[in-house]
């Protein structure tokens, strides 16, 4: 069944939110991700770690003046797998919009 | 952020699989759901319980000869919330296909 082929690392809502925000913005810092998603520090950090461990995002550490600033970007692999996930989701939605062969009601 | 508005009860992959299968087939029994989704008895039973507790599916118990047969259907509320979820998902996908205003790369 196609739905269970959906990439579980990406499908989780906070992680899907992180990846689509990065797809649109290119590069974002922790504070902006947290504000946009409305999640706690701990929750966001946990999901960022999962995405990084799976090679889907990259962490960039720099200094703005003396203040450390951490930003995140999609890796090429992350971008590829996100588009693949979104394509599968679109195909699934298209298949649901047409009444299935077995639909009895 | 729209993604976090996605109904968490429906978004989980096995539950989304159950609901879209019921949307297409109308009524299915436990064995068919299990085969189509390729999940364990325990995993399927757990997700069916969550969907029933949230009023999204209905359980029907009958006998075929002397053998008990349990089938499942979407409730009207389940059908409504599934379509709402699918509409939101489609809108999200459409917004991602067009390069966002902040897209820098």
Image: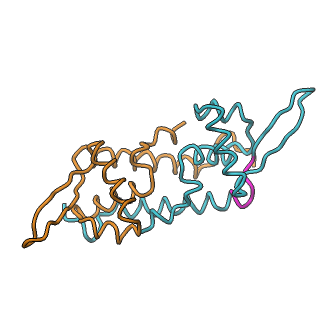
Chain colours: A orange, B cyan
Q: From this view, report whether residue A48 is shown above or below residue B68.
A: below
Quarter of the rendering occupied by the N terminus of chain A: top right
* Mark count: 0
Quadrant assignment, res A13: bottom left
Whether residue B77 appears in magenta in the rendering, the answer is yes
Whole-percent x and y of residue B43?
61, 37
Q: From this view, report whether residue A38 is shown above or below residue B90.
A: below
Q: Which residues are magenta?
A: B73-78
Q: Residue at image x 58%, y 31%?
A: B38
Pick the residue in front: B95 or B63.
B63
In the rendered structure, the answer to whether residue B37 lies left or right of residue A72 reads right
Q: Residue at image x 92%, y 27%?
A: B65
Whether residue A21 appears in magenta in the rendering, the answer is no
In the rendered structure, the answer to whether residue A66 lies left or right of residue B96 reads left
Whole-percent x and y of residue B51?
67, 51
Q: Residue at image x 46%, y 64%?
A: B4
In the rendered structure, the answer to whether residue A12 lies left or right of residue A69 reads right
């Amino acid at each position: 069944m196609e739905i269970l082929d959906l990439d579980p690392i990406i499908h989780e809502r906070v992680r899907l939110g992180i990846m689509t925000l990065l797809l649109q913005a290119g590069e974002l810092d922790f504070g902006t991700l947290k504000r946009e998603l409305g999640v706690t520090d701990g929750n966001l950090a946990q999901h960022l770690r999962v995405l990084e461990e799976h090679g889907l995002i990259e962490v960039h550490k720099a200094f703005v003046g003396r203040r450390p600033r951490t930003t995140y970007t999609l890796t090429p692999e992350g971008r590829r797998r996100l588009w693949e996930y979104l394509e599968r989701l679109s195909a699934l939605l298209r298949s649901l919009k047409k009444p299935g062969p077995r639909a009895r009601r």
